[in-house]
Image (cartoon, rainbow, N blue to C red):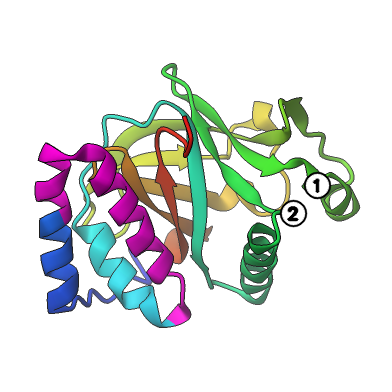
Amino acid sequence: MSQTHTPMLTSTTPDVLLLESLRSLSKTDPAQARQAAWEWFQTLQSTQAQSRLDWLFSEGVAPTGPEGDCEGIVMNLYGSIWLSGLDRLVRLGQLFGGIGWTGKTFNSDGTGYNRLSRSTRIPAFLTIPGYRFRHVDDELVGFDFFHSIEPSPLAPCQDVRAIKYDAPQHNNPLVLPRTRDELVQIIPDVYLGRATLRSGDSWKVVGYFGLRSPQRGV
């Protein structure tokens, strides 16, 4: 399979030192390290941070987890006009506590799904009227996936937790069947994900997201 659209890796000395300090801190104070890593992710949401995210992803390792509900943060979606628009919508929704993606749930049997705020129901119905979300607690769940550890199709082809939406039984809408999310662990229980999109036989990175487990407040 072609390996095109490989990101350029760019790091800064502060990023390198921060990553080293977080990994050291995670051995003595895991909770503080998780919070500090999440705050770092929040500073990497600007479009100017894309090359730094490319570098940070390359520094991650294939995770044994996550398992259960993970809190999510959208960091960049930039591969097309509609992705950029979705990125702005999700961020605005999260800012005002309304429409938005809230995270992913991973099951130990290799299945999982995405979670959205309940107020997403009407916009989602108008956008994808043929798709039906399920209701769990105060969230909508759907966009089901299978996940497993395997090499990325993008150089340097490191092992990642691959999240795939193309199984026919999931009946995922829009471009999801052509989307593959990849997850690496930055420190224990904090993960950096990147979304990739298939075009023909090639893949390109179209954005990044963060996950942390357990969810805040759990």
Q: Tell me if residue 187 comes above or below residue 199 in the rendering.
A: above
Disc 1 on helix, strand or loop?
helix
Q: Is residue 103 left or right of residue 19?
A: right
Residue 46 magenta? yes
Quarter the N terminus occupies? bottom left
Q: Position of residue 143 (x, y in %)?
A: 65, 38
Residue 4 magenta? no
Q: Nearer the viewer, residue 97 or 123?
A: 97
Tag 1: amino acid: Ser
Q: Tell me if residue 75 comes above or below residue 161 in the rendering.
A: below
For residue 48, what is the image quadrant? bottom left
Q: Nearer the viewer, residue 60 or 144?
A: 60
Tag 2: amino acid: Gly
Q: Tell me if residue 47 comes above or below residue 184 in the rendering.
A: below
Residue at 29% in and 55% down: 36
Q: Position of residue 26 (x, y in %)?
A: 17, 43
- Confirm whether residue 134 shows in the render: yes
User: Would you name the residue on which mark 2 appears?
Assistant: 98
Disc 2 on helix, strand or loop?
loop
Rate crowding at label 1 as few (under 14), some (14 to 19) or many (20 or more) other CA atoms within 10 Å: some
Residue at 62% in and 65% down: 91
Q: Is residue 8 left or right of residue 166?
A: left
User: Would you name the residue on which mark 1 appears?
Assistant: 119
Residue at 71% in and 25% down: 136
Residue at 44% in and 23% down: 110
Q: Mark 2 near mark 1, Cβ–Cβ under 8 Å? A: yes
Q: Is residue 55 left or right of residue 45?
A: left
Q: Main secondary structure of the magenta part?
A: helix
Of labels 2 and 1, earlier in sequence is 2
Q: Nearer the viewer, residue 206 or 24?
A: 24
